[in-house]
Image (cartoon, grey):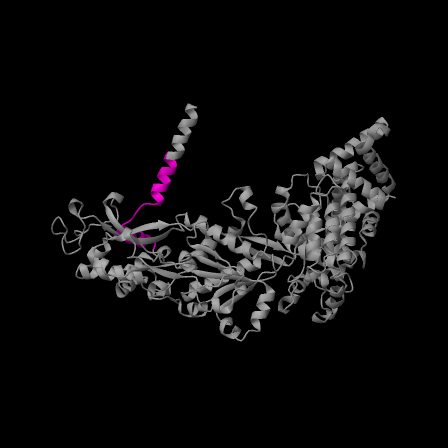
Amino acid sequence: MTDLGARLRATLESERARLSAAHKALSFDEYLQLFAAQPKRHTRDAARWMRAMFEHYGSREVDRPWGKITRWKLFDLPWEDESGQREGLIAHEELQGEVYRVLSNFAEQGRVDRLVLLHGPNGSAKSTFCATLMRAMEDYSHTDEGALYRFSWVFPKGKGGGELRIGFGTSGGKDDGPKPGESYAHLDEAAIDAKIHCELRDHPLLLLPLEARRSVLRDALAPEERVPDALWKGGLSHKSQQVFEALLSAYRGDLSKVLAHVQVERWFVSRKYRVGAVTLGPQMAVDAHERQVTASRSLASLPASLQNVALFEPFGELVDAAGGLIEYSDLLKRPLDAWKYLLLMIETGEVALNTSNLSPNLVMIGSANELHLDAFREHPEFASFRGRLELLRAPYLLDWTAEKSIYDRQVVPSVRRHVAPHATEMAALFAVLSRMRKPSADRYPKEVATLAADLSPLEKADLYANGTIPSRVDRDQSKVLRGNIEALFRESDVYPNYEGRMGASPREVRALLLEAAQSPSFSCLSPFAVLEECATLITRKNEFDWLRQDPLAGGYHDPRYFLRVLRERLLDHMESSLRDATGLVDEARYFETFERYVSHVRAFVKGEKVVNKVTRRDENPDEVMMREIERVLGATGTPADFRGDLISMVAGWAIDHPGQPVDYVGLFPRHLTKLKESFFAERKARVASMAKELLVLLTDSSGLDAESLARAEKTRHNLVSRFGYCDRCARDMASALLKERYH
């Protein structure tokens, strides 16, 4: 108990010190010292601050089948623990890059002159994108680099506790205000009569008169550094300007005495308390208002020079978001008249209120689904808004491995049952197949057109996800197809009905997975249960537009075709796992055989000898072995050409990965798969027999002899330890294979 008490006291002391440092009040002169030390950091508007936030967390390269793309790390929520990181943004690297580009444009031109509108189908992560940005803003605002400052006006009690009448004496005698060098910023709360906050979180440098401010900025910053318009041209908010003028008049123009009333303090972005980060749903009101401050009795102790000034404080969502980000969720669901004021605000940077103009320093992001955007394009006012909107597309994902990550992160942790292998993969593939568009052959050169037109939805999905070329194409066609993956991926970018606009939403698929997890027919979240729920979903044609599309040749827009090919894919996975689990051959043997083949091919291409590992003698490459392997691999063309291409791929990989062993699995996945299938084709009856033994073991082991029991136990152990099965889903797997593959 003593140790616990000591740890608690240490924790409290550490937290006290942290909070004390974070909430330390500064005088205006002290803030100027901070500014002088790092002027570039302290002259950022909201757009520059957000761009710096992207750069603070950094970026990394993500591999795509056609090359690399930049991913900004803030969308991974790296400051969170594992459970928090599950809520990060998956994929959407193009959208991340576009938002960074727009922020950079705002920063370079010195002001935010557009509303960023994310548009895409329902459930395409538009809200997740904005929520992740706001979480990053919260964390960044707590770092030294992301520190944000605002100021308040402080009015102390007069000498002897009487009211301070600035420049006119107090009830206890004459008091001409602060002495030279004095500041009220560090007064105890007990010594303060009134404190007026600035709701818009005005930048402290705005307290300097315009010409003096520009002189300070010119001296502090490099000549090529552009100052945001908010600092170079802007001014204080209306209420702060009234207080400033009243004090300046009371002190007869003595600016140093006016600034003695300024208390600068750090502020932090908070979504929960709507400080610098606000999400606004579709509603029918202007997002800012004002109310009179002097009507409040709590401020009755203001100096006489301010008691006769009608001070109004603004409030509302635009005010809450000042200094940060406001998200207009489903913006186009609002009646146009309810947000027409944004047109003028984007153009001038101001919103007209009853007694003043509001100039919030913020970035505006909106979201809209495609149906509402299509309707808005037909509106007469669209032309007026188009130049003030930055339209950024947020489609559904087309990479099924990324889609699978969504369900692995968001669904699997909440499922109480065991999750069988391939369950989320089946859901992800079904979702992505529903989004695929048939390639338009007339958009490609002749050598590409036929290949593109012949791609099935599943082949196209694998091509997008990991660059897998269909095994049916020959060597030359494989090169052509691999070189045009990006062209296929971007084919529909210019179409209104682009690829990724229609299809199953992740929201629908999440619900489908949760239903499958409760299936009474299975004890696990089984991939078979997932396919059953998919079959149920496709009967609801009246609810989903993507189910009402006419099926096209090749399986596109045909949900029943999706279910057939997915079941075959699932059985392929299960058969592969079972074959490996039987232990009929060590998996390393495939690699050894292929590595031996490559070494002989390398010697053949170079005209060299190979060392016989048994005799230790130099021998010619084994032509018989090479031809047999090439037969299994389905090699086309002359042996010399096939071998030359293979060695070129190995050499290219070695150049890109100097000093690393060749990754044959990543470089030649199809070749290794064919070797494995060839081996097991000769042993299919033996695998089927072991599948029966496994099913008996998992149902009633009394029917097995000792030798069969041992084999079945070994297979079961491998399925559990290596592939993630449990006894129940292993039984389902063995039963399905015996019924559909080994009958």
676 inside magenta stretch: no
Measured as percent of width and height from the top left, residue 128 is found at 55, 54
Name the quarter where the N terminus is drawn.
top left
Judged left or right of residue 528, residue 406 is left
Measured as percent of width and height from the top left, residue 75 is found at 53, 52
Work out which residue is located at the far top of the displayed protein and give it: 2
Measured as percent of width and height from the top left, residue 4 is found at 43, 27
The image quarter containing residue 24 is top left
Name the quarter where the C terminus is drawn.
top right
18 inside magenta stretch: yes
- Asked if residue 180 shows in the view, the reply is yes
Q: Main secondary structure of the magenta part?
A: helix
Which residue is nearer to you in this view: 550 or 254?
A: 550
Which residue is nearer to you in this view: 537 or 594?
A: 537
Judged left or right of residue 697, residue 380 is left
Residue range highlighted in magenta: 13-38
Question: Looking at the image, how many numbered discs can be counted on the residues?
Answer: 0
Q: Tell me the residue at 20%/58% (across/down).
A: 305
Q: Tell me the residue at 84%/30% (across/down).
A: 708
Measured as percent of width and height from the top left, residue 546 is found at 69, 61
Work out which residue is located at the far left of the displayed protein and give it: 173
- Asked if residue 648 shows in the view, the reply is no
Judged left or right of residue 653, residue 321 is left
Which residue is nearer to you in this view: 99 or 526?
A: 526
